[in-house]
Image (tube, coloured by chain):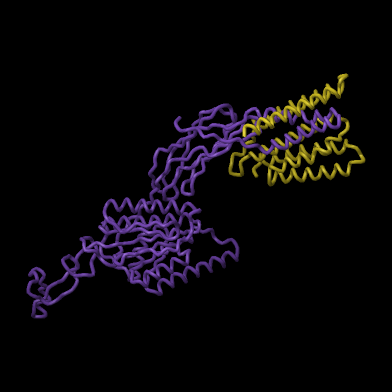
Amino acid sequence: MNGPRVALAAGSLACLVAAETVAVAYGPAGARPLLVICAVLAVGLAGYAVVRRDGRIGAALVVALPALLVADPAWLVGPLGVLLLAAGELCAWSWEQPGADGSPALPVRRLARSGALCGAGLVASLLCYAVGRWHPWAGTAALFAAALGTAAIAWLLARTAARR
Amino acid sequence: MTGAPVALPARRDGRLVPYLTIGAGALVLALVTGRPALVALAVPFVLALGFGLVRTGPLPVTARLTVDATRLLEGDEVRGVVDLDWAGRLDVEVLLRTPAGLVPVAPARWTLPATTGPVRLPVVLRADLWGRHTAGELWVRARAPRGLLVWQGRVAVGPPLRVLPRVERLNRLLDPAESRAVAGVHRSRRIGDGYEFAELRPYVPGDRLRDLNWGATARARRPYVNRHHPELSGEVLIVLDTYTDGLPDVLARVARAAWSIASVHLQAGDRVGVAGLGGQWRRLHPAGGERAKYQVLETLLAMGGDAADQSTHNWVPHRLPVPESALVIALTPLYRRNVVQVCQDWRARGRAVAVAVLDASDVLTPPATEIEAYARRLWDLEIGRRRAALSGVGIPVVTVADGLARSAVSGLRRAGRAHVVRAAR
């Protein structure tokens, strides 16, 4: 592992650890032992993913979700989700780095693109929450958006499957 | 750019499924539980999916690898160009995978961030191993900026290169076992017209007067005539043991020695054949002349290509038919026990066999531990035992290192079992 790859892998782990720590700290006290178990499992899977198999990062992100879902205050859920997204991006870019014999340069362009994506995700997430929180039709609007999003994803999957 | 485009299929990135799971899962959960906050969790992932799947479907890539020479000598460098073209702005990685005998002088891996085609990339390759190789395979991996799909695959194969082994000059020739009845440079066992003295015998009517040996005649008080060996050509079968246990240097030495011996014997008018042990079945019957030289070279190159391709490397327990009159010169590192048995069989059937054992100890890494040192000593003893098994049946054996062809000949001469009668031209 060359320097940039180690740095990217460490960044990925750090994002996941930060998201889980905050989520567990702000989660309900009664469910904390269960959340800690999930968090530890997620960090373990992420560690395995950055060292051995990049495919495991998906499992790490999914296992990390329960702690995020019950985080309180609710506005934290969006930013914590962005941290998970950043963890996934950094893990992927760490695996894209060539080995020790390759160029030891950081993939600056890719990092910049991922940073922009995470920034846009954070803004959109907070906006979505804000609209949902302060608009008179708060819950209805958000749930309407959720239904639309689900339908869009379903359409995307069907289109991809049809092309194959 | 010529050449048909190769359509690379899209494969999903490792992030696609997790993002899809989290995004869709959070949205469905928001609908089921009626919690709007969960939509905020799904939004970044849905955004990533939206950007990442903008471009789908196969990616057509046109690629070509050209080189400025297709015939090289070992150690030569060849320059080439990779031409690539694709549609749209993509992050592209290009890898040139070369066969074992070709080594890229500069890194043969390029990263082209957010680039549109066409691009042209310079390539420099060094021929390290003789044989017939392709100039390499061109692999491409592309992804759209922020994309969650990857297009990857082989897009082009380079032209075939013929890498010729370096030629060493031999000063002397090994003497074939039995001469053929055509004029050549070797002394025949038979007696006839020639320049080299064979024996004295009493004069009989019909002998030429110019063959009278006046000194012997005066001493014996009766006429004696000189008799001479006629100069005839011979047959040489060079047998290459191409099993080198993954040491390409040994293979290169085998090739250089074989090519040197073959070219010198051909130059001397001999008929030279080549046969391989240890790889695929390849054999060239003894033949002479300029055409045979090219045939020998082609056979050697084919053997080199086989040997470099480890997947074809299995021992073929064939029985090589060896002409009765041919001298068999086996070039082997003796890594396989079967080679000893094959040479012993030839000897038992009355063939003249000489073995040059290629010493490759200098290309092995020195033993790092005591156990490795013991293992190396045991291996050396085993090689020595195999040499002794060959010597035991009357086969002259010499050990030769790099720069070996001449030492093979001189070693066999010293062994007193091969006669060298004439300097090579």
Q: Quadrant of residue A41?
A: top right
Q: Quadrant of residue B80?
A: top left
Q: Of all residues shown, which one is farthest toward the right?
A: A30
Say if B329 sits above or below B132 in the image: below
* B109 with respect to B218 (left or right): right
**Percent coordinates x, y for residue B228 in the rendering:** 17, 69
Chain identifier for the yellow-coloured part of the image: A
Q: Indicate the quadrant containing the N terminus of chain B: top left, top right, bottom left or bottom right.
A: top left
Camera-side residue of B363 and A157: A157
**Percent coordinates x, y for residue B190 in the rendering:** 21, 70
* B382 with respect to B259 (left or right): right
Chain identifier for the purple-coloured part of the image: B
- How many labels sit on residues? 0
Residue ID at (40%, 70%):
B344
Say if B311 sits above or below B195 in the image: above
**Percent coordinates x, y for residue A129 in the rendering:** 83, 25
* B362 with respect to A1 (left or right): left
Q: Of all residues shown, which one is farthest toward the bottom?
A: B220
Camera-side residue of A60 and B363: A60
Q: Indicate the quadrant containing the C terminus of chain B: top left, top right, bottom left or bottom right.
A: bottom left
**Percent coordinates x, y for residue B88 in the rendering:** 57, 26
Q: Quadrant of residue A49?
A: top right
Say if A120 sits above or below A29 in the image: above
Q: Of all residues shown, which one is farthest toward the front?
A: A162
Q: Of all residues shown, which one is farthest toward the top?
A: A136
